[in-house]
Image (cartoon, helix red, strand yellow):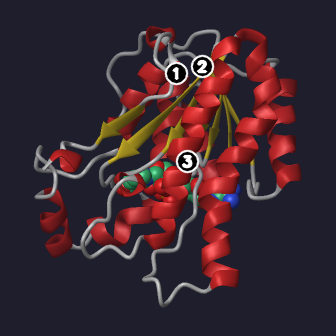
Amino acid sequence: MTPKKHNQRLLGKTAIVTGIGAGIGQGIALMFAREGANVFGCDINTKAAEATLAIAKSEGLSMASLHPSDLTKEKEVEKLVELAIEKFGRIDILVNAAAFCAFEWIEDLDYETTWKRSIAGELDIVFLTCQKAWKYLKINGGSIINFASANARQALKGSPALVHCATKGGVLSMSIQMAMEGGPHKIRVNTISPGLVHTAATDHLASDPEKREFLNDKHMLGRIGKPEDIAYAALFLASDESSWVTGADFPIDGGASKW
Ligand SMILES: NC(=O)c1ccc[n+]([C@@H]2O[C@H](COP(=O)([O-])OP(=O)(O)OC[C@H]3O[C@@H](n4cnc5c(N)ncnc54)[C@H](O)[C@@H]3O)[C@@H](O)[C@H]2O)c1
């Protein structure tokens, strides 16, 4: 869906958005660029990143990307941040949407592979980008948007989300600490906890008609989310309209966490 009207709410700002190749990262990258931001993205998946860049190009938006880029590698994160500075000269917004996580029950998780890979793919990845971008965000102040989840606080029946609970609990509490450390520098740090959003990561659930109906029913509004549902909330958090908002978590979830 292309939003109908753009008010240039992010004009003059530069945003790093990770994981622009799919889902929530793609939705946010495109919305931010449509709202006037210069977007510097990245993805581990070259083809997916290029598809997003092609949409941006067709609309005449300001977007560049580093791909393939594996953000679990410290040097690649440094490269991402330095290239964004080289291209656009500043960083005002950082959105950490790139993620990988294995969903397995406790007895099936392999410590050396699936556990460690998921911790790196959902927790290390957020720490590294925030740490490397911090010195640039300090210059003018800025907004960091991280993704937590209902799983940061609760178990969802039938979901083998053990390592996801660990990473998202970590992202949530780490973001509050970062908000405290960032306050004096006017760096705001907030999290969004989405309900189930139809993305590459959830397509196996959302595309199955039986599961889809069950999942729709889990949301007060009777449907699972779209990436734009999340992007509109991220837009507020990235813009100056949220200049007194930090250390907060926003459940953007069609009411799923409240019933
Ligand atoms: N989709 C949901 O229902 C949902 C619900 C709650 C929270 N979230 C969170 O929102 C965020 C975005 O989720 P999504 O569903 O859009 O994910 P997605 O899997 O659809 O997209 C993630 C993107 O990140 C990229 N990526 C993965 N590992 C990477 C790495 N090491 N380096 C660079 N790029 C990498 C992938 O290639 C992909 O393009 C995640 O943190 C996720 O946990 C999503």
Q: Are marks 2 and 1 in contact (CB under 8 Å)?
A: yes
Determine the CA span between mark 3 and mark 2.
25 Å
Q: Are marks 3 and 2 in contact (CB under 8 Å)?
A: no
Q: Amino acid at mark 2?
A: Ala
Count the marks.
3
Asked if ligand 1 lies within 8 A of label 3, the reply is yes
Q: Amino acid at mark 1?
A: Ala
Mark in front: 2 vs 1: 1
Q: Which mark is residue 171?
A: 3
Mark in front: 3 vs 2: 3
Question: Is label 3 in a helix, a strand or a loop?
Answer: helix
Which residue is depicted at the point 54% across and 67% down?
101
Q: Earlier in the sequence, mark 3 or mark 2?
A: 2
Determine the CA span between mark 2 and mark 1.
10 Å
Q: For label 3, count other residues whose C-alpha is less than 10 Å away and answer few (under 14), some (14-19) or many (20+).
A: many
145 over 88 or under it: above or below: below
Q: Earlier in the sequence, mark 2 or mark 1?
A: 2
Is residue 161 found left or right of 134 in the rendered image? left
Which residue matches tag 1?
238
Q: What is the x, y in percent for residue 114?
A: 61, 79
Observer able to see residue 45: no
Observer able to see residue 168: yes
Q: For label 1, count other residues whose C-alpha is less than 10 Å away and answer few (under 14), some (14-19) or many (20+).
A: many
Q: Furthest-bottom residue in view?
A: 107
Is residue 20 found left or right of 219 in the rendered image? right
Which residue matches tag 2?
37
Mark in front: 3 vs 1: 3
Determine the CA span between mark 3 and mark 1.
18 Å
Which residue is depicted at the point 31% across and 45% down?
226
Q: For label 2, count other residues whose C-alpha is less than 10 Å away and answer few (under 14), some (14-19) or many (20+).
A: many
Which residue is depicted at the point 54% across and 58% down?
167
Question: Is label 1 in a helix, a strand or a loop?
Answer: helix
